[in-house]
RNA sequence: GGGUAGGUUGAGCAGGUGGUGAGCUCCGCUGACUGUAGAUCAGCCGUCUUCGACUGUGGGGGUUCGAUUCCCUCCCUGCCCA
């Protein structure tokens, strides 16, 4: 029986960057690729049709949230996650490991699993590797993630190492518990920003028969340089491992370049949709905050170089008005644009890697967003 | 015309019955957000030479060392009665 997921990639002339295709039961995914986050079986404010129009090929949904509400059993009875949310493309489900990290103050971690209080009603909840597999198999995602433990990378090395070792033991249990043949399972490398620990973690996770390798525990407060250095270590340690590589939780436009050059094939991040809901648009002139007063009288599209519905049909002035009036359409239009922008950016990266124009693209985008990726666009808009 | 309740920083309020009114919520301005407890959060929001100073409680006048407070007068708004 052929594997349900296959990944074929080829090297490029740009660093360690690869071009590839990940095939799943619900369609093919071109890499490098970005996955919008749809935690609760919805990419906030967007319909599946919107996602398709934006060029989205795969989305991420969340084990923890969906198990609490509406319940993975219910979703299974209703025909699985794809049918439930009317998205027939590939879906990757996160395992809940990140919630353990972000909600850790509410619970405790032991070697068997983690206990914490539901954010909905305070009821005690328990996740173990076996439980995470059970939930994800019930949801029926195309790609399941191993249940891991990530910790603040700035903690003492001992604590980072303990969490990493636990993640490795849990990885074995996830593999043992996972049985759906039509669902891939990715392992997650941990180890904080400690080079030695990362090497140990890559050796452990890559030594297991996972369908893909994820890099976790980054973009949680460490510097851009630290993340890049850690990705270098991971890339070296993975060497010519042919499996798809997924950098979890990244990122902003400038972050993609640094990671792609270090061999990353897949990304996910809440940023495009989260910042969209507060008025921040990613555009060909950098970040624009649609709430800024200066946009109230600007008749042009949010991004003149974008072909999304928002930019084809609406003005900056209209977006600025919608945000001020707290109109719901603001969330959809801005989210649609940011997701489209991110998909376009990934496509341009793929094209650039293929035809050799990647370096130029990198220069252009880095200039638009600034070296740190956090600079505002003032220079590029008012300094023309 | 008579009576009554009011007039506080863009709006709405709090407070203050002789001893330092810049306090709140909106609105407004700006920023943050990286495997989403986030349509959230933070800062600013009278003026200025901004670790501080100054101005400001409807207008004007008076009493007083000192007035948002007491007195006189005028203006404005709501309500009631004619």
Image (cartoon, grey):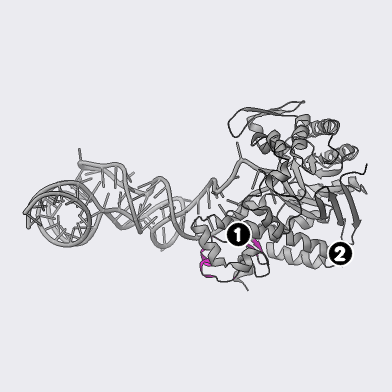
Q: Can you tell which mark lies on residue A333?
A: 1
Q: Position of residue A173 (x, y in %)?
A: 83, 30
Placement of A102 over or under A295, stated as above or below: above
**Foreground pick, B55 / A134:** A134
Gap between marks 1 and 2 measured at Cα: 31 Å
A187 inside magenta stretch: no
A299 inside magenta stretch: yes
Count residues near mark 1 (Cα–Cα under 10 Å), then give few for <14, some for 14-19, many for 20+: many
Q: Is residue A157 visible?
A: no
Q: In percent of the image, x 51 and y 56: which residue is there? A: A327
Q: Which quadrant: the N terminus of chain A?
A: top right
Count residues near mark 2 (Cα–Cα under 10 Å), then give few for <14, some for 14-19, many for 20+: some
What segment is highlighted magenta in the picture? A282-300
Q: Position of residue A38 (x, y in %)?
A: 68, 47
Q: Is residue A272 visible?
A: yes
Q: Chain of mark 2?
A: A
Local SS, label 1: helix
């Amino acid at each position: 029986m052929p594997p349900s997921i296959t990944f074929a990639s080829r090297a490029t002339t740009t660093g360690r960057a690869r071009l590839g295709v990940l095939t799943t039961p619900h369609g093919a995914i071109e890499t490098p690729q970005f996955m919008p986050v749809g935690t609760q079986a919805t990419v906030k404010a967007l319909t599946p049709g919107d996602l398709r129009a934006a060029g989205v090929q795969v989305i991420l949904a969340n084990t923890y949230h969906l198990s609490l509400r509406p319940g993975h059993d219910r979703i299974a009875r209703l025909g699985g996650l794809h049918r439930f949310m009317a998205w027939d493309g590939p879906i990757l489900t996160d395992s809940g490991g990140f919630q353990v990290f972000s909600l850790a103050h509410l619970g405790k971690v032991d070697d068997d699993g983690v206990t914490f209080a539901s954010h909905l009603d305070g009821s005690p909840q328990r996740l173990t590797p076996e439980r995470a597999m059970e939930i994800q198999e019930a949801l029926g995602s195309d790609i399941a993630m191993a249940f891991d433990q990530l910790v603040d990378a700035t903690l003492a090395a001992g604590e980072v190492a303990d969490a990493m070792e636990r993640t490795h033991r849990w990885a074995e249990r996830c593999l043992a518990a996972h049985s759906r043949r039509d669902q891939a399972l990715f392992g997650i490398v941990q180890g904080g920003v400690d080079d030695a620990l990362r090497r140990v973690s890559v050796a452990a996770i890559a030594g297991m028969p996972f369908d893909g390798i994820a890099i976790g525990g980054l973009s949680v407060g460490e510097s851009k340089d630290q993340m890049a250095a850690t990705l270098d270590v991971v890339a070296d340690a993975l060497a010519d491992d042919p499996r798809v590589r997924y950098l979890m939780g990244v990122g902003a436009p400038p972050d993609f370049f640094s990671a792609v050059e270090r061999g990353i094939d897949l990304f996910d991040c809440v940023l495009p949709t989260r910042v969209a809901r507060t008025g921040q648009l990613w555009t060909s002139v950098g970040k624009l905050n649609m709430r800024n007063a200066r946009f109230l009288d600007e008749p042009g599209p949010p991004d003149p170089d974008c072909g999304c519905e928002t930019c084809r049909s609406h003005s900056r002035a209209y977006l600025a008005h919608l945000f001020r009036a707290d109109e719901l359409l603001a969330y959809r239009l801005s989210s649609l644009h940011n997701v489209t922008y991110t998909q376009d950016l990934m496509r341009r990266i793929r094209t650039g890697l293929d035809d050799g124009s990647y370096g130029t693209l990198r220069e252009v985008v880095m200039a638009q967003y600034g070296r740190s990726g956090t600079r505002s666009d003032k220079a590029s808009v008012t300094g023309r």
